[in-house]
Image: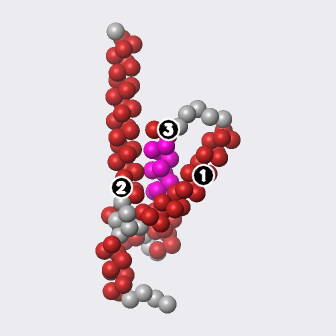
Amino acid sequence: MTASVEETARVMDRMSGIARMVYETMPSDKVAGYVLLALVFIMSAIVFKLGFARQLPLLKNIIIYAFLFIGCLVLTFLALFLPIVEGLIVAALILIIYRVRRMNEHKEDSIA
């Protein structure tokens, strides 16, 4: 059963910005879903690495990222209509700014 043009337009109007852009630029909906999942996972991994990750053995890292991927499956469904990817981008930028400032302060302390 195919969706009518009106239903498709209504759904596209309700989508978040990045999700709409992904679905409009990808050749099929299936590919767009995988791209959105990849975006959510990559951004979640960056935020996790910048804000929370510690040095762990390889097996523990694999387990953590596997559970992160499972959580991203749920976030991908939410990312269709909520600004999940946009929020992850903002969180990553804030954590990057924090890291840069902390590194600059550490350099200043070591020089003085």
Residue 67 image label: 1
Residue flagged by tag 1: what amino acid is it?
A: Phe
- Who comes first in sequence, dot 3 or dot 1? 3
Marks 2 and 1, how far apart in space? 22 Å
| Residue ID at (37%, 18%) | 107
Q: Is residue 52 visible?
A: yes
| Residue ID at (35%, 43%) | 93
Q: Position of residue 47 (x, y in %)?
A: 45, 44
Q: Are marks 2 and 1 in contact (CB under 8 Å)?
A: no
Secondary structure mostly seen in magenta is helix
Residue 47 image label: none
Q: Is residue 40 magenta?
A: yes
Residue flagged by tag 2: what amino acid is it?
A: Glu
Marks 3 and 1, how far apart in space? 15 Å
Residue 52 image label: 3
Q: Quadrant of residue 14?
A: bottom left
Q: How many marks?
A: 3
Q: Is residue 78 magenta?
A: no
Pick the front one: 111 or 15: 15
Residue flagged by tag 3: what amino acid is it?
A: Phe
Pick the front one: 19 or 14: 14
Considering only vertical position in the picture, is 68 above or below 52?
A: below
Q: Position of residue 83 (x, y in %)?
A: 36, 60
Task: Identify the residue position indicated by label 2 in the image.
Answer: 86
Give the position of the C terminus as an image quadrant: top left
Marks 2 and 3, how far apart in space? 19 Å
| Residue ID at (40%, 58%) | 84
Q: Which residues are magenta?
A: 38-48
- Who comes first in sequence, dot 2 or dot 1? 1
Secondary structure type for disc 3: loop
Secondary structure type for disc 1: helix
